[in-house]
Amino acid sequence: MGQKTNSTILNLSLKNAEWESKYIEKNTEESSVFLYKNIEIRNYLNRIFKVHGLSIQNCKIEYSLTTAQFFITFFEIKTDTKKLYTKIDSKEIIVFNNSKNLIKYLVNQVIAIDLNLFLNNKTIIFKIQNLNEKFDVLINTSKTNLLEYKSIIKQFRKFLKTSSFKELIKILFISICEKDSAKLLAEAVARNFSKQKKQHGFLLFLLKRVLEKVINSPFSIVNGVKIVISGRFNGAPRANKKIIMVGKVPLQSFDSTISYYEETSYTLNGTFGIKVWISEKVTIIYYVSTT
């Protein structure tokens, strides 16, 4: 049996597995329609959020006969966040002071209207969470977490001078605290590779060193992280493959929860293929019979 690249199929066999999309189809034809709509909606949401400097970490969709519910968690990219939104018809420029106002405007004035037409006038319900704010609450509510976070940050003080590296370090922290964070991490690595023309070894060194520190932190819910990057490193004439492996990532185990995502980074040296596996800790409950 060969190595499983995408372990999503194995994860769906677990009892506590959660599907990203939930709907009840009446026949096979309706199932294919739901699948098509699901792909189009996800591509649309990813595009809208990305244009405004927001990266979707997870998106769960639930359909019923009259409503469609969306549960979205996102990361605010500080370096790329666009505080301006232009309306094409009236050529009006709206300035937003924070991400809350931006999200509120996008959901109520743009996304809800478009999805309402696409889904044939269904009631649209949104529940959105900002991972930047959630991570700050997690760190500040516990003194142990705060001291551990500060001690790790001090070790990478020289990298914090660069805004892209500072953002990448925070995403690495969030990735080991949140479930299903492979997409967020893969997109962050792709953004950094698109900005770095050379000195890719410097970026790989930072990834491995930070992962080695954060995985053993008290707020980590991760057993291991595996990152495979293939492309022309440092402008080399031939493509090469680099593997970053920290902790344990069992790809053929049926009882392990693996978050997987792959992303492509477009650079002047060609494309870089990025694959990320994150092995999450599984809580096992033992039942003891008293009879």
Image: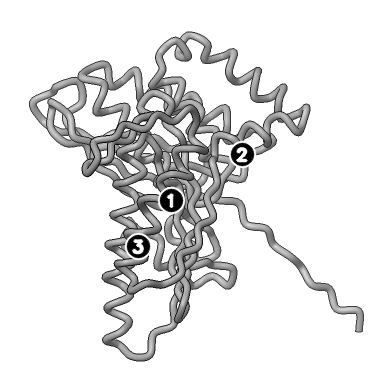
> Which amino acid type corresponds to the residue marked 3 in the rendered image?
Leu
Q: Residue at x 22, y 44 (%)?
A: 89
**In this view, 190 is above or below 69:** above
Q: Residue at x 15, y 33 (%)?
A: 239
**In this view, 165 is above or below 241:** above
Q: CA distance from mark 3 to mark 2?
A: 27 Å
Q: Secondary structure at mark 2?
A: helix
Quadrant where the image shows the N terminus: bottom left
Residue under pointer 2: 134
Indicate which disc residue 115 carries: 3
**In this view, 115 is above or below 226:** below
Q: Secondary structure at mark 1?
A: helix
Give the mark nearest the N terminus, 3 or 2.
Answer: 3
Q: Is residue 263 left or right of residue 220?
A: left
Q: Secondary structure at mark 3?
A: helix
Q: Residue at x 13, y 27 (%)?
A: 269
Quadrant where the image shows the C terminus: bottom right
Q: Is residue 219 left or right of residue 141?
A: left
Give the mark nearest the N terminus, 3 or 1.
Answer: 1
Closer mark to the observer between disc 2 and disc 1: 1
Residue under pointer 1: 107
Closer mark to the observer between disc 3 and disc 2: 3
Q: CA distance from mark 3 to mark 1?
A: 10 Å
